Image (cartoon, rainbow, N blue to C red):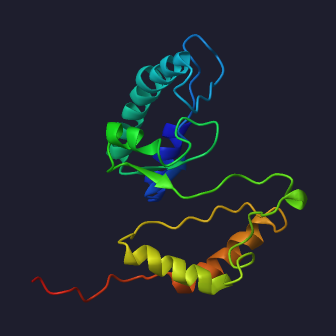
Amino acid sequence: MVRGTVELAAELGVPTAVLMSGLPGAKGDSRPNWVTSSWPPEAAGILRHQWEDVALPYWEGLAGFARRKGVRLAVEMHGRQLVYNPARFPRLQDAVGDDVVRVNLDPLAPSEAGRRTWNYVTLGQGHPGGAVFWRDFVYALRAVGYDGSLSIEHEDVIVSSEEGIRRAVEVLRPSIFRQPPDWSPAEV
C-alpha cells in the first residue's frame, strides 16, 4: 500500500508522501511492541531486532523506491511507532538518506473533542493570531531556508472536510511566497 501511494504521488506530481515509521513486533511476535527505553536488558534486544532486522531493511528498500520515483517520504512521529520523537528520527534518516526521508510536523490525532483542553481546528480558527499567525509561521519557515510543501491535514471534528480544506486554503494562500528572493547578501 505504501509503494502504491508513492507511485500515485509521483504520477500526480506530489513531491512528498506522509507516512508513519511502522512498529515491528519483537522477534517471533505478531503484534507491535512499543519499546521506549533500552532497559530492562531484554528491551535492548527487542529494539535491536526492530531496527536492524525489520525496520531498516524495509526502509532502505522503500527509500530507494521513493528516490527512483522522485518522491520524498515525510515521517509523522507518533506514539506506538518506532520513530515517535525527534530523538529517534536521525537513526532512520542516517540509514536511508536525508535526501529522501524527512519529518512531517504534526502533533497527536483527535479524540474526545468535547473533553480535551485542545483540539485540532481549521486553520485560522483556533489560534488567537488567526491568519496573522500563519503568515508569520510561513515567513519563519522561509527565513530558515524551507522551500518545500505545506500540506493541510483536516482533523477538525466540528467542520466538514470540504469546508475546512477550503477555509484553510483561504488562510494560507496569501501567506505563500511564489517566487524566490531576488536579493542575496554579497560574498565577503
Left or right, 113 with reference to 146: right
Give the residue drawn at x 64%, y 82%.
Answer: 170
Q: Pinpoint residue 88: horizontal percent, then vertical percent.
A: 47, 41
Q: Nearer the viewer, residue 159 or 10?
A: 159
Image point 50% across, 77% down: which residue? Answer: 138
In the rendered image, the quadrant that contains the N terminus is top right
Residue 76 position, x and y percent, is 55, 49
Tell me where residue 144 appears, x and y as whole percent. 37, 73
178 to 61, vertically: above or below: below
Image quadrant in which you'd find residue 43: top right
Q: Residue furthest right?
A: 114
Q: Is residue 89 above or below residue 165?
A: above
Can you say whether 52 is above or below 125 in the image?
Answer: above
Residue, x 76% and y 73% (percent of image)? 163
Locate residue 135 relative to residue 87 in the image: left or right.
right
Q: Quadrant of residue 20?
A: top right
